[in-house]
Amino acid sequence: MTLATVWFCLIGFLWAGYFLLEGFDFGVGMLLPWVGRDEEDRNAMLGTIGPVWDGNEVWLVVATGATFAAFPAWYATMFSALYLALLLILVCLIVRVVSFEWRERSASPRARTAWQWANTVGSVGAPFLWGVALANLLHGLPLDDKGVFTGTFLDLFSGYTVLAGLATVLLFALHGATFLTLRTHGELGARAGAAARRLSVPAVVVVAAFLAWTVAVAVDGNERGVAGPLVPAVLGAVAVVACAVLVRSGRVGWAFVATGVAAVATVATLFTGLYPRVLVSDPGFANSLTVTGAATEHYALTVITVVGAVLLPVVLLYQGWTYHVLRARLAGGG
């Protein structure tokens, strides 16, 4: 296995970590207006993610930085083609970050409600656009022979990529609901469990449909064998079905594990379907960017591999310790 392939796998791992960890706090933000009945409930909901949400976003920063360092051609083309979508994601993330601070500082009930809805809108908008953006890497973007994007913003939206956005939103909402069921108790925890049960059926349908379509796109549009993307796709579909069963049987811990597995499997399906390319060109498949062609020189890959091998375990241990320390359940207003 070449260093370029190692870094492609590592970037997939970082995106999986982002979906796993940031997914549930996006989900909590989505559920704020519906699961929380009063300010005490919503304070408790935000309290479950308050100490960790900014740490979860580090996975996005590292994934982006790793792409820039290991695959500069991929980084340049992807950020050029997805510029407006990524700008909208950035706006959603900024609005969401600001809402945490300004909701807490606002004395007016109307202002607190407005910032609560800002958090929810940002928590829905960013995952939807992430799903659209990542699905386009596999579905294909119009590139010329120099790897320059020749399309428009509307070219990012197709039946498949919109389904990817909806699947990401539903999966994150379900992930957030199971997280709240695990991290809260009393009436708030009961309402979170009810939300998880209601979300589980549409999540099963939409996520399973997206995973199946992803395998088809990988085979037809990226000349991939079916075995590679099929394994994580089946795992993801089984996991989301298992979550639907588990939330109905009251096994909330395992239900949260199941949604986490589904989130990781979704990213794995996209990345295994994408390899050995990093960005598919459609039309003009010959203009697609490959792992080998988009990678930086061998010396640079060697240096960042040594740095990553030293720092990544430290980051993982620190974040694991943080979740262990902040594992206590919270209660709402009743």
Image (cartoon, helix red, strand yellow):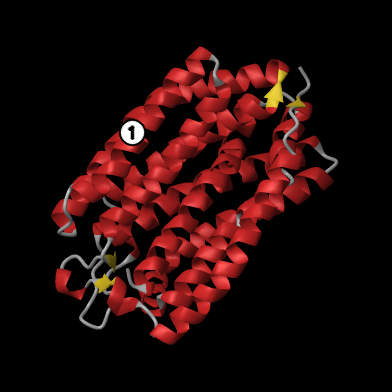
Q: Is residue 83 above or below residue 97?
A: below
Q: Nearer the viewer, residue 11 or 142?
A: 11
Q: Is residue 37 above or below residue 224?
A: above
User: Where does the image place residue 98, in percent across and percent down from the top left?
Assistant: 70, 54
User: Residue placed at 60% from the left, 42% from the top?
Assistant: 25
User: Where does the image place residue 243, in percent across and percent down from the top left?
Assistant: 45, 25
Q: Amino acid at mark 1?
A: Ala
User: Residue placed at 35% from the left, 46% from the top?
Assistant: 164
User: Residue placed at 74% from the left, 28% from the top?
Assistant: 329
Q: Which residue matches tag 1? A: 237
User: Which quadrant would residue 108 be assigned to in this image?
Assistant: top right
Left or right: 272 as drawn, with respect to 172: left
User: Which quadrant would residue 12 be assigned to in this image?
Assistant: bottom left
How packed mark 1 is, by other alpha carbons closer than 10 Å (few <14, some 14-19, many 20 or more), is: many
Q: Nearer the viewer, residue 311 or 242?
A: 311
User: Residue placed at 32% from the left, 48% from the top?
Assistant: 269
User: Where does the image place residue 114, in percent across and percent down from the top left?
Assistant: 69, 41
| The C terminus lies in quadrant | top right
Q: Nearer the viewer, residue 103 or 191?
A: 191
Is residue 312 in sight in this rendering? Answer: yes
Left or right: 225 as drawn, with respect to 83: left
In terms of secondary structure, where does tag 1 sit? helix
